[in-house]
Image (tube, helix red, strand yellow):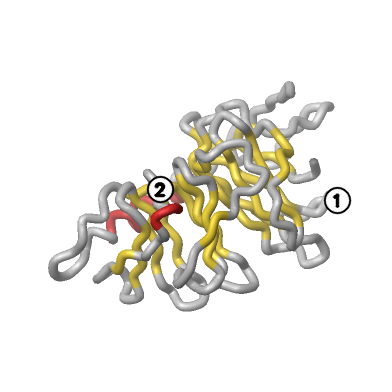
Amino acid sequence: MRTIQRRVTGLRPPIRTALIQPRWSRVVLIAGLATAIALSLAALGETAGPQPDIGHLHALLVSPTDGSLWIGTHNGLYQSSDEGRTWQRVKIPAELAAMDFMSFAQDPINPKVLYVGTHNRGVVRTMDGGETWGSFSTGLGGPDVHALAVDGYNAAQPRRLYAFVMDKGLYRILGDLTEWKRVDDGPSNPDVRALQAVNIPTGMGGIFLYAATSEGIFRGPDCF
């Protein structure tokens, strides 16, 4: 699938668009976003007492309901309920144990439902806050899921869950379905590290996907 690119040259409005609307466009965001993420990860090291060897980090989630922290690492999943002072390893069944836990997405309606993208096990899901886990990968084109996102903004549309599978493209689930469908190649740079659904009022429903890559941030409207 051919992707037509346009570049947004800074933050000065209005943003000029091409006559042919591209599916994914490169954008420039405020550097404070990267700074905030870096500070959040740095704060994980400010713990008291002996801590488990969590390995290097791939993903961080702050639960909006109770403020608990989740991190995905090379050595497993960990959770903290005291602002990162102490960490507890999350038990994952042996058949779902992954080489790396790469990304998180939390259900906006039920915070006990959590999706985790992995390096070699596709997507795993818990529906009870981490007590039990199961595979959630039916329809995915591969096991290497580096980025997940969930759309919880538009109540008039069915819930949308997104996964970027390395070398395979962007997949989506609509509503309460349980099978992934491939919908797009994704941005021109396939090294996608993170996805975020953002509500921007438009005549097409207002949901855009932002993709963080090794060459910058790209944006595409979810109208496909």
Q: Tell me which corner region of the image, top left, top right, bottom left or bottom right, holds residue 182.
A: top right
What number is the disc on residue 98?
A: 2
Q: CA distance from mark 1 to mark 2?
A: 41 Å
Amino acid type indicated by mark 2: Ala
Name the residue located 75 percent from the left edge and 45 percent from the top edge.
Answer: 222
Residue 47 visible in this rendered orientation of the protein: yes
Name the residue located 61 percent from the left edge and 32 percent from the top edge.
Answer: 168
Which of 92/151 is in front?
A: 92
Residue 221: % across, % down: 74, 43
Which of 168/220 is in front?
A: 168
Q: Tell me which corner region of the image, top left, top right, bottom left or bottom right, holds residue 111.
A: bottom right
- On screen, residue 57 versus residue 105, left or right, reads left
Please say if 14 is above or below 127. above
Q: Which residue is mark 1?
A: 203
Residue 193: % across, % down: 49, 40
Judging from the image, what secondary structure is the residue with disc 1 in? loop
Judging from the image, what secondary structure is the residue with disc 2 in? loop
Residue 9: % across, % down: 61, 31
Q: Residues within 10 Å of mark 1 (few under 14, many from 20)?
A: few
Please say if 113 is above or below 21. below
Q: Which residue sits furthest front?
A: 95
Pointer 1 or 2: first along the chain: 2
